[in-house]
Amino acid sequence: MFEFLKKKLKQSIEGIKKAFKEEEEEVKEETKEEITEEVEKEVEVKEEIKKEEVKKPKLLERIFKKKEKKEKPKEKPKLLFEKRLSEEEFEKFFKNLEISFLQANVAYEVIQLLKEKLKEELVDKPVKRGKVEEKILNTIKQTFEEILIQMSPQKIIDKIEENKRIGEPTKFLFLGVNGTGKTTSLAKFCKWLQDKGYSVVLSASDTFRAASIEQLEKHAKNLGVKVIKHKYGADPAAVAYDAIAYARAHNIDCVLIDSAGRQHTSKNLMDELAKLKRVAKPDFTIFVADALTGNDAVEQAKEFGKIGFDAAILAKADVDQKGGAILSVSYVSEKPILFLGVGQDYKDLEPFDKEKLIQRLIK
Ligand SMILES: Nc1nc2c(ncn2[C@@H]2O[C@H](COP(=O)(O)OP(=O)(O)OP(=O)(O)O)[C@@H](O)[C@H]2O)c(=O)[nH]1
Ligand SMILES: [Mg+2]
C-alpha cells in the first residue's frame, strides 16, 4: 500500500523544492554582492581604525572596537533560511498532489482536509530552506495520524475473557459488499483465535450465494471447527441463533457469523442484515472492506455505517498499491481498523499498525 502515492508525492515535492532552490540561488547571488560590498566597507573601516589607533591613545581603543562590531553585516544570513510560499504557488503545488491523491482513490473529503492542513502550514509562513520537504511530509503524517484509527486486538481478547467469566460466547458478525473478502477474513480470524487458545464455531449465515456454505465448510474442515448451517434460502438470523445456542451448549468461546455479500444500494438486503444483527447481538460487528475498492469505499462505509460496525478489516492490502480505501473508510466511518488482510493463507492477517503504514508513505 501507498507505493503509488509515495512516488507521486516525491514528484510533487521535487517540483516545490526546485522552486525553493531557484529562489535560493537568486538570493545567494544578491547576498554575495551585498556581502562583498560589506566586506569592502569593513576593510576600509578597519584601515581607518588602524590609522586612528596610531594617532589616538590606547584608552580610546575599546570605543573603536565597539564601532567595528556595529559595522558588521547583521540581517543577511536570515535571508538564506526563509521563504514564504504565496497562495498561488501553493495552489500550483497542490494541484499536482490532488490529482495523485484522486488517482490513489483517496476520498475527496480527505484530500480537502489535507489541503487545509498543508495550506495552514505553508502559505505565508516562513519555511526554513532545505526543510520544505520535511514540513510537507510532517503535515501529511499528522493528518493521516488523525484520520486513521487503530484498534488493538487486545480489546477483543479482553472481551472474550470477560464473556468467559459469565459463561457467554463472544459473537462476531462479518459484513460487507460482495467479494470483498468476508469469508476469507473470517477464516483467518478463526485461525488467529485458535492460536490464542480459544474455541470457535462458525455460522453459515450466507444462505444466499451459490456454494457459500461449501466454501465455509471447507475452511472449517481445514481449521478443525464446526459449522452450523441450514439450507440455501434459509433465514440467516435463524442460522446465527442456532450457532450461538450450540456455542452456549458446548462451552465454545467464539461464534463467527458469515453473511451474504450485498450491494449497499440494495435496501432489502440491508434490512435483512439489520435483522441478522438484531437477532445475533454480536459483540463485534466487523466491516470487511476491499483495499482495491476505488472511490466507492466512501459510500460503502457510509451505508454499512448505518447498520453499525465496531471495526473494519481491510482485505487485499497485499495487492493494493494505492492505499486510498483505508483512508476513506477510516475518515468516513470514524471506526478503527483492526486487521489488514495480506494474502490468501490463514496466517495472512496482520494487526493494523498505523505508524508502520504511515512510515511506508513518508520514508
Ligand atoms: N490477495 C488477497 N486476496 C484475498 C484476501 N482476502 C480475500 N481474498 C480473495 O478474495 C476473493 C473473495 O474472497 P471471499 O472471502 O470469498 O469474499 P466474500 O466477501 O466472502 O465474498 P462473497 O461471499 O461472494 O460476498 C477470494 O478469491 C479470496 O481468496 C487478501 O487479503 N489478499
Ligand atoms: Mg463470503
Image (spheres, rainbow, N blue to C red):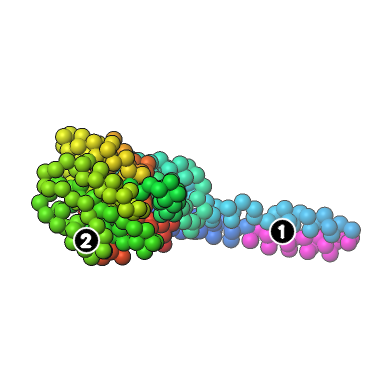
Q: Is residue 9 left or right of residue 45?
A: left
Identify which residue is drawn at 32% across, 53% down. 250
- Say if disc 2 is inside 8 Å of ligand 1: no
- The label on residue 45 is 1
Type of amino acid under label 1: Val
Which segment is the magenta one? 39-58
Q: Considering only vertical position in the picture, is 91 above or below 10?
A: above
Type of amino acid under label 2: His
Residue 30 on image: x %, y %: 51, 55
Residue 361 on image: x %, y %: 37, 58
Q: Is residue 191 left or right of residue 58?
A: left
Give whichever of discs 2 and 1 has the lower sequence position: 1
Q: State the image quarter where residue 344 is shown.
A: bottom left
Residue 283 on image: x %, y %: 36, 44
The dominant secondary structure in magenta is helix
Marks 2 and 1, Cα distance to the nearest angstrom? 89 Å
Q: Is residue 202 left or right of residue 51?
A: left
Q: Nearer the viewer, residue 45 or 72?
A: 72
Nearer the camera: disc 2 or disc 1: 2
What residue did someone put label 2 on? Answer: 219
Residue 235 on image: x %, y %: 17, 41
Identify which residue is drawn at 20% across, 34% down. 271
Q: Is residue 188 visible?
A: yes
